[in-house]
Amino acid sequence: MIDRSLFDEVLDRLGVGEVCSGVSTGAAGRNAEGEALVSINPSTGEPLGTVTTASVEDYDRIVEASSRAFGEWRRTPPPARGEIIRRIGLELRANKADLGLLVTLEVGKTRSEGEGEVQEMIDMCDFAVGLSRQLYGLTMASERPQHRMFEQWHPLGPIGLITPFNFPVAIWAWNAAIAAVCGDPVVWKPSPLAPLTAVAVQKIVERVAAASELEGVFNLCIGRDAELGRMMAKDGRLPLVSATGSCEMGRSVGQTVAARLGRSLLELGGNNAAIVSEAANLDLALRAVVFAAAGTAGQRCTTLRRLFVHESVADAFVDRLRHAYESIRIGDPWEEGVLVGPLISERAVERMLSAVEKSRDQGGEIVSGGKRLDRAGFFVEPTIIRATPEMSIVSEETFAPILYVMTYSSLEEAIDGQNSVSPGLSSAIFTDRVTEAERFLSPEGSDCGIANVNTGTSGAEIGGAFGGEKDTGGGREAGSDAWKAYMRRQTCSVNYGDDLPLAQGVEFEVGGPTRVTSPTAPPTP
């Protein structure tokens, strides 16, 4: 067991007490009047610390503060905004080991995954700093003489941000770093299952904000249930709400935001699949499948949950997979060599065991795992189940390390099976045939937002836009041109001549008739 005094030292260095406020407007933390929320270590079931949650009054005050900050922040040049993000990135570098360990303790990720998540925040800050000088518009050709037509992008306003427990700090960076350089303050509602990491991130941001006399741009508002998220979805002061979580949560947020004609950026569930062809490098496929299916105890939105293996190699591959699963070390995630830590809660354990039982009832064969470990905390065995597409449980996403393995005879059958579920986040194929790879990536292939060849479903890089289709919500976060979600587009025309030519050949004379000409139309034969 990790020494409690070491943990206390980590909290002290991060500026987080065992009892702390879950409300801040980005300069100095305020004491909230809400209820106490206890953070639990999923490896032991014991409390780590207590956070005082936000009251309704706290929430209203924070949104008002962010709205006031928007007036000044949007006038700040984007490269100057990027400088603030650069300083935040430097603070994250200085606190990487401590923040990574806190992620490990609070959500059960291994040490390498915990620090890897903080590294993702650092990478995101680097990306955003570069982006602050590249918020490009376009110049378009005008059909009117002596006119210039172009588009430009303006800050949108305060952004509501709802993040899940499984990436308690990285998803904040995906959104907050980009939103900030775009000129938008952020109001952050983290998962109540990971409040201490949120407070720690906010403390890091506050040090930078205080040194820059900056208040109201980065805001934290912790709630103990979904009510705070519902308030954000209804709040017209937040023109965009970015929400990552379950499909059920996303539907609620999306419908509520749409009812007030706001915008939502949704990154929701993913019942992800991979295809292993008879032409695959099976050694490579094996390693990728094990990490994608068992890594993070199956609690990534990109976790591999369904595996389609060609019938000619299925039995041999599943046997190798079983042996690999038997070698996985499960245990306290801060210990060296541990590959799989705990699930996040007792409820998550119950859901996994229920899914395993349903699989049995529907004719599934348990190849490996399927049980809870007899020890403190919320530990389960990563599980392999031989299944068929007809089993209804296969179409359900269980946020746990369950891998359903099915066979196929033709690539079309495998692709149809992969695309048959309602989410459309991540997908992969393992093959050395270029024709199979290209068909998988074609319009008739994977219907997911992420499609990989010879690499697993998880482990996306920040340079590419992250998100999926169908019930995954259609939102995109992080790289590419995902920044456009946080801004408003404006199309502009400038007439630098002395005449007033109209578009589409319309002629208009004050006091005279209106007629239409078509100067660019081809002559009538």
Image (cartoon, rainbow, N blue to C red):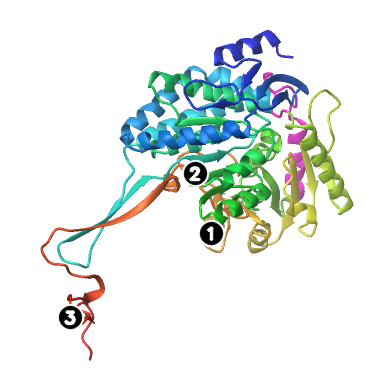
Specify the label residue 435 is tagged with: 1
Specify the label residue 481 is tagged with: none
Q: Horizontal placement of 50 versus 511: left or right? A: right
Q: Residue furthest top?
A: 5
Q: Horizontal placement of 7 versus 153: left or right? A: right
Cα distance between the residues tagged 1 and 3: 65 Å
Q: Horizontal placement of 91 versus 392: left or right? A: left
In the image, 66 versus 42, the foreground residue is 66
Secondary structure of the residue carrying tag 3 is loop
Q: Residues within 10 Å of mark 2 (few under 14, many from 20)?
A: some
Q: Residue furthest left?
A: 498
Secondary structure of the residue carrying tag 1 is helix
Cα distance between the residues tagged 2 and 3: 46 Å
Q: Residue at x 48, y 30 (%)?
A: 218
Examine the rendered structure and indicate whether residue 215 appears above or below residue 461.
above
Q: Residues within 10 Å of mark 1 (few under 14, many from 20)?
A: few
User: Which residue is identified by label 3?
Assistant: 512
User: Which residue is identified by label 2?
Assistant: 237
At label 1, which amino acid type do we have?
Answer: Thr
In the image, 440 versus 297, the foreground residue is 297
